[in-house]
Image (tube, rainbow, N blue to C red):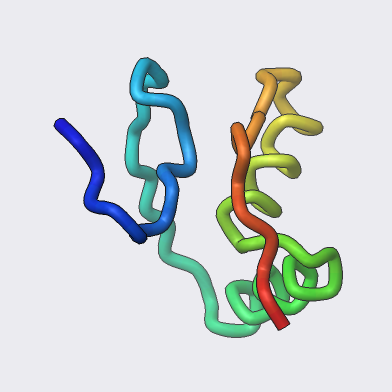
């Protein structure tokens, strides 16, 4: 499937198998994740991915993830 021209590039290569993970947490904790991610110039997804990598040893690579714009 071809991606439309001018669209955002995919975050992961087409051959990377992905799984959605949802988590419920108190608003204070979710806000803290968002604030920490923002301070590090990351998306929450990348922030949590790197945090999970540190805890589990399973590598997380955003594979060309785009930086947040100002």
Residue at 23% in and 51% down: 4
Relative to 58, 17 lies left or right: left
Q: Nearer the viewer, residue 25 or 4?
A: 4
Q: Which residue, as the protein is rendered here, is positioned at the far front?
A: 5
Residue 55, relative to residue 49: is it above or below?
Answer: above
Q: Which of 51 and 29 is in front in this view?
A: 51
Q: Quadrant of residue 24?
A: bottom left
Residue at 34% in and 33% down: 19
Q: In which quarter of the image is the N terminus?
A: top left
Q: Quadrant of the C terminus?
A: bottom right
Q: Which residue, as the protein is rendered here, is positioned at the far right?
A: 39
Relative to 53, 26 lies left or right: left
Residue at 53% in and 77% down: 26
Q: Which of 2 and 14 is in front in this view?
A: 2
Residue at 79% in and 66% down: 41
Residue 48 x/y as whole percent: 65, 50
Q: In which quarter of the image is residue 17?
A: top left
Residue 20 x/y as whole percent: 33, 42
Q: In which quarter of the image is residue 35?
A: bottom right
**Count of marks overlaid on the render:** 0
Residue 49 x/y as whole percent: 64, 42
Residue 56, relative to residue 46: is it above or below?
Answer: above
């Amino acid at each position: 499937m071809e991606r439309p021209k001018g669209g955002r590039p995919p975050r992961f290569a087409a051959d990377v198998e992905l799984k959605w993970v949802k988590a419920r947490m108190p608003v204070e904790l979710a806000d803290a994740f968002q604030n920490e991610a923002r301070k590090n110039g990351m998306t929450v997804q990348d922030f949590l991915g790197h945090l999970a990598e540190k805890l589990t040893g399973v590598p997380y690579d955003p594979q060309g993830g785009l930086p947040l714009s100002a």
